[in-house]
Image (cartoon, rainbow, N blue to C red):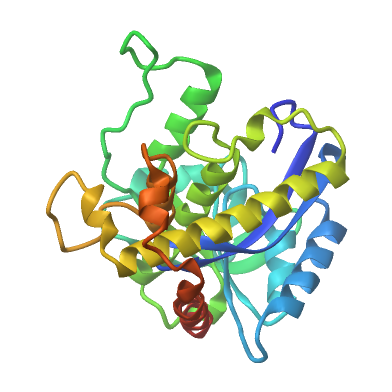
Amino acid sequence: MTPDQRWHWLRASVAVEGRSVTLYEEVHPQHRLGNLKVHRQFLARVAELLPPGCEPIVMTDAGFHSTWFRAVTARGWAFIGRIRGRDMVQRGAGPWIRGTALYGHATQQARDLGPHAYVRSHPIEARLVLVKLPARGRHRRNIYGHRRASRTSRKCARAASDPWLLAASRRLDHLSAHTIVRLYAQRMRIEQSFRDTKNLRFGQGLSITRSHTRERLQMLLLIGHLAAFVQRLIGEAAKARQLELNFMATHRRTRPEISTPTLARRILLSVSPSDWLDRLTPWAAIPPLRAQAINAFVAA
């Protein structure tokens, strides 16, 4: 959460219309990173926010392991998570091997590897799915146009190029391997919401904050959440008036070229935002947003 890694935050989001919307988030110090008690309390608070009868599919990155999946399963929910690094897996009575040893079998067609035990120290049964996504040719470059060679850039590049080895709950055995991959791909929308909050150029710039207390950071997150909500209202109102046509680089109609938050940000950063805002009624976008949220929970 902060450049010095002193503080981290847990965020629960739901994918709504191509972007994630934050349901709940907490700030915790470094020494509580991965703490099981913190995870259980977090899941309990998220459960209080969900509609009755809602059984979500919890999707997490490679930083969450078997103890987290066990806590999710205890609530009657399903999970999909990524396996990377030194995590061990076991098929049947076979030997324990690193998950990375399976990378060589990855293809662009999602493969169902069947049930495995995951994490040797605290094993949990999960269904493994393996896929190698095609390279998109994206490279982060420095001011001279060369590829960045910093440790962070190399780490991110390796994470992006590695195959996806996914651990899925046995509750999802009825879904195909391709569907599991498509579901997990929605987690990238959460990464976009992190950028919206932290990035100085494209978001709210939380990464440069000088706050060093939990209370201040949580207040900044609340302010950022409220600002993002207003921004989404402006974007939805602008879409209702088809104002996105003024900011599109092409005439493509098959899918949106810019997201709702990006449309709102471009309106607010335009030369004369008042000319645009005077034509909008953001409060009228609340019913459509409510309908989108309900549909997202029904889909979950």
Position of residue 225 relative to residue 44, above or below, is above
Left or right of residue 51: residue 166: left
Determine whether 70 is above or below 201 in the image: below
Q: Which residue is outermost to the bottom? A: 53
Image quarter hosting the N terminus? top right
| Residue 222: image location, x then y, percent | 72, 54
Determine if residue 18 is in view.
no
The residue drawn where x is 39% and y is 58% is 260
Q: Depth check: give the residue in front, 125 or 297.
A: 297
Q: Where is residue 87 in the image (x, y as percent from the top left)?
A: 62, 47
Residue for point 61% across, 40% down = 86
Residue farthest top in this picture = 144
Q: Residue at x 67, y 56 (%)?
A: 11
**Front position in the image: 267 or 167:** 267
Work out whether residue 52 or residue 182 is closer to the camera in this orientation and state it.
Answer: 52
Residue 64 image position (x, y, % from top left): 66, 53
Q: Please, which residue is most extreme toward the left here? A: 251
Tag count: 0
Relative horizontal placement of residue 105, taking residue 189 as reference (left or right)? left
- 181 horizontally vs 121: left or right: left
| Residue 105 visible in image | yes
Query: What residue sits 18% from the left and 44% below the top?
Result: 249
Q: Where is residue 10 in the image (x, y as percent from the top left)?
A: 71, 53
- Position of 159 with respect to 108 (left or right) is right
